């Protein structure tokens, strides 16, 4: 382990340069025009893993973007096997004019590396590639058996991954999995994620006429789909911040007093959230702390409304149709399929008779909670303490990682969610960045983790 740590210190420039090469590939999974870039990113990772001496390196096809698999299984039958998950796809870059640097040209300013994918998730997955490299280039050995599973569809809901994991259960079998795709509180305060929320992503369509209409001739006679849409969407919350869909909360699991006490030891406060976001005031479900609101309570958010005229100047039109994208973050025991059905039924029930209404489900993912007493989690806590100089705190993550429930259910393996990003890294937004001290400290923490867990 000491040799591996020294290797990282002596090869920082090389490791950073290789990450920058990966970051330059615009692997945006949602756009058809970036298909070649997705294949290039997968091939680059396969080539890198091969160069380190990993075996069975393969770019495995799925119904969508491929999964990169590789392993090193020479630590012995008594050593544990760790599955390392990451994703090489990234979000689109719009709005482009808000970027202060080119989104796919890695740019270093002080301690910050700016680029799309810097933290989510190329930089964080590369933490583990660099840690494996440090062991293999110094001793030719790892303290445990390693398997890599790097997917290309996380940013579009991991649409193909569930079938992939189910089909390759024997190949992916492991004693634990580690995912670095989350953030910590600040550069000195690490976090072990104790759970992630699920997701249902819906789209609502309303049509009020065959074609756009003149608002002077038909205004007040034919209802405007945009008026109807915003009225329906506004009714989905009450004045207490609760979702108004009947049955939405029926299976929501309340925290035990002990769980609530543990989660609220976090330094996250209303003041820190206001500072991070620049919001003039906070909003949320009454009766819960900000830690609980963003991690263990379900939510509903409107992400976009389309329809009508939004160009410069004026156009007095009643649009023929409007649509809206809506997602709900779900907590343990909420079934995504059931919530999608409840949402669909409710939209049809409350929509005016003046509209033809259609609702589609775009994505579903289950929530997951991890056992923080599992040996794999305990080893991660020790590794964080060695890498960052302090014990981690435990939080529930408000975001969604579909792979967590897939690994839990299909592989029956505990999942360690060990992130190294920061709250202000601008994930999914312009000017995404990675705090470079966290990148290097992350590599050292991963080295410590392999060493500690390998000796379990």
Image (cartoon, rainbow, N blue to C red):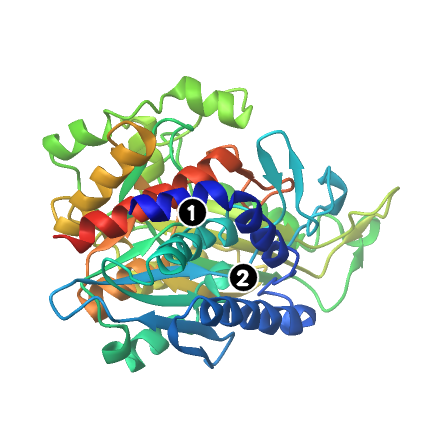
- Residue at position x 23%, y 61% from top? 144
For image coordinates 50% across by 55% down, the residue present is 351
Q: Earlier in the sequence, mark 1 or mark 2?
A: 1
Kindly indicate whether the residue at mark 2 contacts the one at mark 1 (C-beta within 8 angstroms).
no
Determine which quarter of the picture holds residue 170: bottom left
- Name the residue tied to disc 2: 89
Residue identified by numbered label 1 = 7
189 vs 308: above or below = above
Horizontal arrangement in the rendering, residue 155 relative to residue 312 (left or right): left
Residue 37 is situated, as x and y percent measured from the top left of the image, at: 64, 69
Q: Position of residue 386 (x, y in %)?
A: 27, 34
In the rendering, at what x and y percent does residue 408 appear? 22, 62
Q: Which of the pair 345/352 is nearer the observer?
A: 345
* Camera-nearest residue between 294 and 237: 294
Quarter-of-image position of residue 33: bottom right
Identify the residue at image location x=37%, y=60%.
Answer: 136
Q: Residue furthest top?
A: 271
Residue 348: tell me if it is visible. Answer: no
Please name the residue shown 39% across and 71% down the image.
Answer: 54
């Amino acid at each position: 382990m000491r040799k591996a740590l020294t290797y990282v210190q002596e090869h920082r420039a090389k490791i950073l340069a290789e990450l920058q090469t990966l970051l330059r590939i615009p692997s945006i999974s949602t756009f058809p025009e970036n298909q070649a870039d997705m294949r290039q990113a997968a091939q680059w990772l396969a080539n890198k893993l091969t160069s380190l001496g990993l075996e069975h390196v393969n770019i495995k096809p799925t119904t969508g973007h491929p999964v990169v698999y590789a392993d090193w299984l020479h630590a012995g039958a008594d050593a544990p096997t760790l599955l390392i998950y990451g994703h090489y796809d990234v979000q689109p870059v719009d709005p482009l004019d808000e970027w202060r640097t080119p989104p796919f040209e890695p740019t270093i300013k002080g301690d910050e590396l700016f680029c799309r994918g810097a933290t989510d998730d190329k930089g964080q997955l590369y933490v583990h590639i660099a840690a494996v490299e440090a062991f293999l280039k110094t001793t030719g050995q790892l303290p445990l058996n390693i398997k890599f599973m790097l997917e290309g569809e996380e940013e579009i809901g991991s649409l193909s991954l569930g079938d992939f994991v189910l089909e390759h259960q024997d190949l992916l079998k492991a004693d634990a999995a580690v995912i670095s795709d989350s953030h910590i509180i600040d550069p000195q305060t690490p976090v072990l994620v104790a759970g992630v929320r699920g997701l249902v992503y819906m789209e609502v369509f309303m049509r009020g006429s065959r074609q756009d209409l003149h608002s002077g001739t038909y205004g007040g006679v034919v209802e405007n789909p945009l008026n109807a849409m915003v009225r329906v969407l506004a009714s989905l919350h009450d004045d207490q911040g609760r979702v108004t869909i009947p049955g939405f909360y029926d299976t929501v699991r309340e925290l035990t007093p002990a769980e609530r006490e543990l989660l609220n030891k976090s330094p996250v406060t209303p003041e820190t959230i206001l500072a991070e976001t620049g919001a003039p005031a906070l909003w949320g479900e009454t009766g819960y702390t900000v830690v609980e609101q963003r991690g263990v309570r379900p939510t509903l958010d409107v992400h976009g409304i389309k329809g009508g005229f939004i160009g410069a100047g004026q156009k007095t039109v009643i649009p023929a149709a409007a649509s809206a994208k809506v997602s709900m973050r779900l907590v343990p025991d909420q079934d995504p399929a059931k919530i999608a059905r409840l949402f669909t039924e409710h939209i049809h029930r409350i929509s005016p008779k003046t509209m033809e209404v259609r609702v589609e489900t775009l994505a579903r993912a289950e929530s997951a909670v991890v056992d923080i007493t599992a040996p794999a989690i305990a080893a991660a806590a020790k590794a964080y303490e060695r890498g960052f100089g302090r014990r981690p705190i435990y939080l529930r993550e408000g975001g969604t990682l579909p792979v967590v429930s897939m690994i839990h259910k299909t592989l029956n393996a505990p999942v360690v969610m060990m992130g190294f990003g920061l709250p202000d890294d601008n994930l999914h937004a312009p000017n995404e960045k990675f705090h470079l001290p966290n990148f290097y400290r992350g590599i050292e923490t991963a080295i410590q983790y392999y060493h500690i867990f390998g000796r379990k």
